[in-house]
């Protein structure tokens, strides 16, 4: 049963990636305009992370800024990793265990095929981008 669920989720992930790209191309300039406005206060590393998150990393398929979809929200990930002094980069390199939602680890493992091909700079950018979603009170 777990294998069937994992297979269905994997298929859904990759089919969502194609749909997301089509929607972006239909949106045209509006998508770029929103990204530029939102990214004005971002560091170069955070901008790189956002490009990876929304693009070839395909992270957006499972993670949204403030709500759990398939995986935990970006805010939750950033908050917990900061509180526990964890390393998102090490997790994405499979050098650290999951600390946010270990029950979803099997689903996330399918994405390590993507993250293992990212450079250290790209992985650090992803981490910086995700940390930019932490509430400012912390």
Image (tube, grey):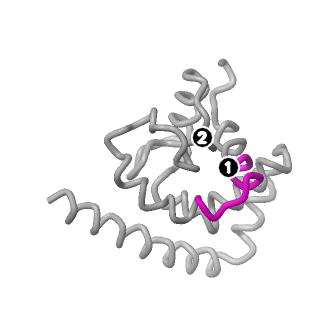
Q: For marks 1 and 2, give the one nearer the viewer.
A: 2
Residue that sits furthest to the top in the current view? 137
Q: Is residue 15 above or below residue 40?
A: below
Closer to the camera, 126 or 98?
98
Asked whether, in this view, residue 132 is left or right of residue 3, the answer is right
Q: Which residue is mark 2?
A: 88
Q: Residue at x 53, y 37 (%)?
A: 77
Q: Position of residue 47 (x, y in %)?
A: 78, 53
Q: From the image, which quarter does the C terminus lie in?
A: top right
Q: Which residue is mark 1?
A: 126
Label 2, secondary structure: give it: helix
Q: Which residues are magenta?
A: 116-125
Q: Position of residue 46 (x, y in %)?
A: 76, 47
Q: Position of residue 57 (x, y in %)?
A: 60, 62
Q: Is residue 119 magenta?
A: yes
* Mark 2 residue crowding within 10 angstroms, few (<14) / some (14–19) / many (20+): many
Is the C-beta separation of discs 1 and 2 under 8 Å? yes
Closer to the camera, 125 or 121?
121
């Amino acid at each position: 049963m777990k294998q069937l669920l994992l297979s269905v989720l994997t298929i859904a992930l990759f089919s969502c990636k194609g749909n997301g790209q089509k929607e972006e191309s239909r949106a045209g300039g509006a998508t770029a305009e929103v990204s530029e406005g939102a990214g004005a206060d971002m560091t170069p590393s955070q901008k790189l992370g956002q490009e990876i998150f929304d693009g070839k990393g395909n992270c957006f398929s499972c993670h949204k800024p403030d709500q759990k979809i398939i995986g935990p929200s970006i805010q939750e990930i950033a908050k917990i990793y900061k509180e526990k002094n964890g390393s998102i980069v090490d997790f994405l390199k499979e050098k650290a265990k999951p600390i946010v939602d270990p029950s979803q680890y099997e689903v996330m493992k399918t994405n390590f095929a993507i993250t293992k091909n990212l450079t250290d700079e790209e992985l650090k950018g992803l981490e910086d981008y995700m940390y930019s979603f932490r509430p400012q009170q912390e």
